[in-house]
Image (cartoon, grey):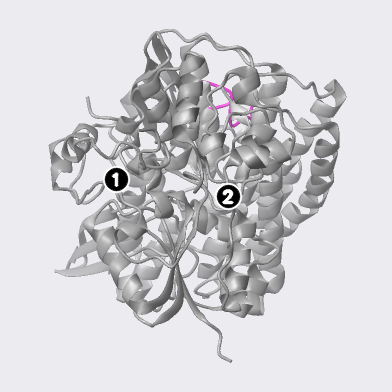
Amino acid sequence: MSKPTVGIFGLTGCAGDQLAILNCEDQLLDLVALIDVREFLMASSENDTVCPLDIALVEGAVVSEKDAGRLRAIRKRSKAVVALGTCAVWGGVAAMDRGTDRRKLVEEVYGPVGLGYDSIPAQALHEVVKVDLNITGCPIEKDHFLAAIANLLNGNAPQYAQYPVCTECRMLENNCLLVERGEICCGPITAAGCQARCPGLRVACVGCRGPATDFNAPSLIAMLAEKGFDRERTAARLRTFSPVEVAS
Amino acid sequence: MSVVVIEHLARVEGHGGITVELEGDTVANVRFDVFEGARLLETLIRGKSYDEVAPTLSRICSICSAAHTLTSLKATENAFDVHVSPQTELLRELMFRGESIESHALHLFLLAAPDYLDYPSAIAMAADKPAAVLLGLRMKKLGNLIQETIGGRAIHPVNAVPGGFGKPPTVDQLIELRSGLTQGMADSDAAIDVMASLPAADFCHSDTVFAALRSPNLDSYYSGDEIMAVSDGNRAIVHAADYKSLTNEQSLPHSHAKHSNFRGRPFMVGSLARLTVNPRRLTGRLAVAMKRLKFQLPADNPMDNNKAQALELISDVERALEIIEQLLRAGVKDERPVPIHPRAGTGTAITEAPRGMLIHSYTYDAEGRIVSADVITPTALNAASMELHFRRAVEQSADREEGVISKRLQMIARAYDPCISCSVHLLRRR
């Protein structure tokens, strides 16, 4: 059987998910032996930019027409498009205040010349093309990536937790930062899968994995309001990594 | 007129290209094109509470995420006049070393070395030179282990917070790091062997201004608040508060990055600049390694930045070991972060990220919410210097064949180890 052809792409972001792939130091050489990496600009200067792909791994958000065009071209040549990381899955930090006037922001940062830049409100991949698999995280967990590749090679879809970080945190028997210390912790509404990394270090969850499938945001906001936290600012905090209005 | 265009620079972080316009044999125009999308984080961060700033601005760049996090924390702590514990200072310096080891190993072995040996990638190189690639991966993993142990995660660290750390590492964790670093000592020597075995990259010579943080104890990426610029034996100092004198305010149509200069001249930041500004670090194993690399200061070849990174792999491993010994001797305390009392004011921090000076400067309101934020990254500082060196390389090339020129330009660009996601985040226009 021929090896599946794979492309690894970055739209606009921090390249953290491509770096997470390169951080699989112990598996990297075995991994590239199992697949046929045809395009990976961050790691190779020899790229086939037109061949059909079995799997396209795409990180970053769409923040320009150029990004959107690249993504559509990737979709066209790929059997499966995998969104890697919170920016690709949810829009990420660039999408945090999508309602704000984009032209005004660009002009403020770059001056009048900025008005000529190609800049659109940040979008997740699924808002532009059909996405076959989402692997969230800022960055993605290496284990989730490796499991996804192993599953895709065997024609399966990997399963990821639907519950929030809060559930994971309780299973690990961490002290609750929200209830016991009165800190704004996004654990109750954020997608699990990180083994509650931050609360385990006595640091409140900032929501970097985006919203969980099952969560109760109004109850979190109400609980935080009871502890004296301003509703609007709490809602803004919950939107940092995802524009999805979890707080209404 | 003929044009050399590198549409999309490979084996670097982010999206950029190079354009050189020739009129006959004269170089008319040189551009480092940055077309990384604008994320506008400097404006989106406005109104955020002080504890949200580092985790948000860390996302500017993954490879430098520890440096962005720690520089952000220092700027915030400076604004609120917070003084962290000596243990926190040591742990932060250790994180910097971990990031530097990871970043340099990634850059030297996976991104830059394939050029010297004519491979398109480290993956292709691994088929013929497995030992060099495995060495690079091993050092990279060591750097990541340090970042994971101290920072809680290799990319976008979570454990470093305003005032200190969520949870300091345990003695057992530090002992495990120490044994990894002992192997790292041998590996960093082997890295010098690999670098010394590469063909010379001798196609660009130029007078260069170098700028780096002047470190008070000669070997810190995190302490100090003076920038020293060195050129032709002349030295000049810029204080942290005056950092804006290093950047001009001009945005360019071809680039989302703005350009910087020192007294009208472009300057280079990064490993080579650090060694030039702090040459007294070059003793012991470093002095021996310098000889093996045929590396001399002052350097006039930007490709020497690769050699300087290899030298820093040695000093980073040594310094990380020293820090761990110091922590173990003192006993690691399970201390909590220093309490923060926000107040209105401005705080600036300058540090040395793996690819050069990094500046964060914030103004806060009385409640501890961001009024304005400036972030100046090494790749942005380097942009003008890169263009200067592209120009010199083309001028000095007797061979006018496009393929030759193109390859040399790409090698120079990679020697700067650019981080293009970083470069689009710059001084906000006033």
Task: Point out residue B214 in the picture as x, y percentages from the top left corner.
Answer: 54, 26
**In front: label 1 or label 2:** 1
Query: Given the image, on which type of amino acid does mark 2 rest?
Result: Ser
Q: Is residue B224 magenta?
A: yes
Q: Where's the N terminus of chain A, which quadrant?
A: bottom right
A19 displayed left or right of A52: right
* Distance Cα–Cα, label 1 vs label 2: 24 Å
Residue A238 got which mark? none
Q: Chain of mark 1?
A: B
Q: Nearest the camera: A164 or A197?
A: A164
Determine the residue positioned at 75% across, 45% down: B285
Query: Given the image, on which type of amino acid does mark 1 rest?
Result: Ala
Q: Earlier in the sequence, mark 1 or mark 2?
A: 1
Q: Quadrant of residue B240?
A: top left
Residue on which disc 2 sits: B103
Q: Chain of mark 2?
A: B
Q: Is residue B291 magenta?
A: no
Up-down relation of residue A168 to residue B247 (above or below) = below
Q: Residues within 10 Å of mark 2 (few under 14, many from 20)?
A: many
Up-down relation of residue B388 to residue B195 (above or below) = above
Task: Point out residue B346 in the picture as x, y percentages from the top left corner.
Answer: 40, 14
Q: Nearest the camera: B348 or B352?
A: B348
Q: Is residue B399 visible?
A: no
Residue on which disc 1 sits: B38
Q: Is residue A120 visible?
A: yes
Determine the residue positioned at 57% across, 43% down: A164
Q: Secondary structure at mark 1?
A: loop
The magenta segment: B214-226
Specify the farthest residue to the bottom: A1
Q: Quadrant of residue B329?
A: top right
